[in-house]
Image (spheres, rainbow, N blue to C red):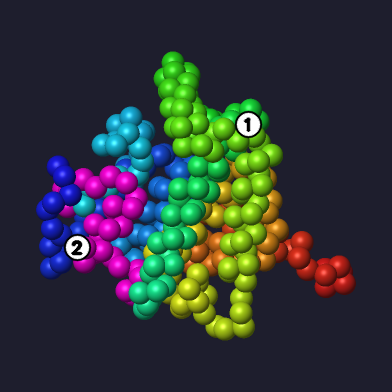
């Protein structure tokens, strides 16, 4: 069914998120699946998750949702559908101005269309990282399914990333792109002395916070991006922003919470430790 049936605002909507399988207490391996989870939890929308694989999805990629029988694929259009049907509007709740909304659109595009492909490339083109991400994605499947599915999935990713352009970069060039993005984000998120907490210095998260929180959680929630994970956990601004999202909305991510606390401990002066 296509996304044409309106949500009945007089009743609680039933939301089913179709996404990659998650292991208990660990974030999903997909930044876009994590984005929709962030959006739903930030908006306090109850949902259930059904594990699936990309080749079963309407656009052959995850996530997609079923909202009261309406199938909506692609994270961007899931968020739009929820806004248009009165289910969730984080920008409105956060009180964003039209200029802030426009800035969010640009920043979302930068991270989703330029940086996330570089993240994926660093996972699947590096042999060490590929072994880790393949285990995290396909490790629980039977051998006779895991091997051909791994081959199909990596081939499909490789072809799309080469066509997109980032797949033509070297490992070192990809790291330059990722470091620049994280350092720029660190500058953007560094506190300015106000009591505001989120990307636009609002007291509640907006749409862009679901995107950025998801990307940082995804980078640090798997072990397939060690280069980026080290930068994020080593940055007070990036780590603090991620911590706010995790502790406030994903308390089950205990492994990540412990890693954040361990990184915070390394910031303390030696005399304070003693």
Q: Which residue is mark 1?
A: 126
Tell me if I can see residue 146 in this picture. no
Mark earlier in primary sequence (2, 1): 2
Looking at this view, is 61 or 180 the one in front?
A: 180
Q: Residue at x 26, y 37 (%)?
A: 58
In this view, 250 is above or below 192: above
Q: Residues within 10 Å of mark 2 (few under 14, many from 20)?
A: some
Where are the magenta residues, as a range? 68-94
Along the horizontal axis of the image, is 69 left or right of 103? Answer: left
Q: Quadrant of residue 130?
A: top right
Q: Residues within 10 Å of mark 1 (few under 14, many from 20)?
A: few
Along the horizontal axis of the image, is 130 left or right of 202? Answer: right
Q: Residue at x 58, y 62 (%)?
A: 185
Q: Residue at x 40, y 62 (%)?
A: 105
- Residue 24 is situated, as x and y percent measured from the top left of the image, at 48, 45
Q: Is residue 89 magenta?
A: yes
Query: Contact (CB < 8 A) between labels 2 and 1?
Result: no
Secondary structure of the residue carrying tag 2 is loop
User: In the rendered view of the protein, which quadrant contains the N terminus?
Assistant: top left
Along the horizontal axis of the image, is 42 left or right of 212? Answer: left
- Residue 4 is situated, as x and y percent measured from the top left of the image, at 13, 51
Q: Quadrant of residue 80?
A: bottom left
- Residue 199 is situated, as x and y percent measured from the top left of the image, at 50, 70
Q: Residue at x 55, y 55 (%)?
A: 216
In this view, 193 is above or below 133: below
Looking at this view, is 54 or 163 the one in front?
A: 163
In this view, 174 is above or below 85: above
State the separation of the CA atoms marked 2 and 1. 42 Å
User: In the rendered view of the protein, which quadrant contains the C terminus?
Assistant: bottom right
Along the horizontal axis of the image, is 157 left or right of 180? Answer: left
**Rendered image: mark on residue 85:** 2
């Amino acid at each position: 069914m296509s996304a044409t049936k309106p949500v009945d605002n007089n009743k609680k909507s039933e939301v089913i998120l179709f996404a990659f399988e998650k292991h208990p207490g660990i974030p999903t391996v997909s930044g876009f699946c994590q984005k929709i989870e962030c959006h739903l939890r930030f908006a306090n929308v109850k949902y259930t998750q059904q594990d699936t694989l990309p080749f079963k999805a309407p656009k052959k990629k995850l996530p997609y949702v079923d909202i009261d029988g309406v199938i909506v694929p692609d994270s961007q259009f899931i968020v739009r559908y929820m806004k248009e049907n009165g289910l969730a509007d984080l920008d409105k709740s956060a009180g964003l101005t039209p200029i802030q909304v426009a800035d969010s659109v640009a920043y979302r595009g930068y991270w989703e269309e330029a940086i996330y492909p570089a993240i994926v490339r660093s996972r699947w083109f590096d042999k060490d990282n590929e072994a880790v991400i393949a285990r995290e994605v396909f490790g629980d499947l039977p051998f006779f399914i895991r091997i051909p599915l791994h081959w199909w999935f990596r081939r499909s990713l490789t072809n799309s990333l080469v066509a997109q352009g980032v797949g033509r970069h070297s490992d070192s060039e990809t790291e330059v792109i990722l470091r620049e993005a994280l350092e720029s984000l660190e500058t953007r998120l560094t506190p300015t002395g106000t009591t505001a907490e989120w990307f636009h210095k609002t007291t509640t998260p907006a749409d862009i916070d679901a995107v950025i929180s998801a990307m940082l959680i995804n980078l640090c929630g798997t072990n397939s991006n060690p280069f980026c994970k080290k930068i994020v956990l080593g940055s007070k601004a990036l780590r603090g922003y991620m911590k706010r999202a995790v502790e406030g909305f994903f308390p089950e991510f205990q492994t990540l919470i412990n890693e954040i606390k361990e990184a915070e401990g390394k910031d303390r002066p030696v005399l304070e430790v003693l």
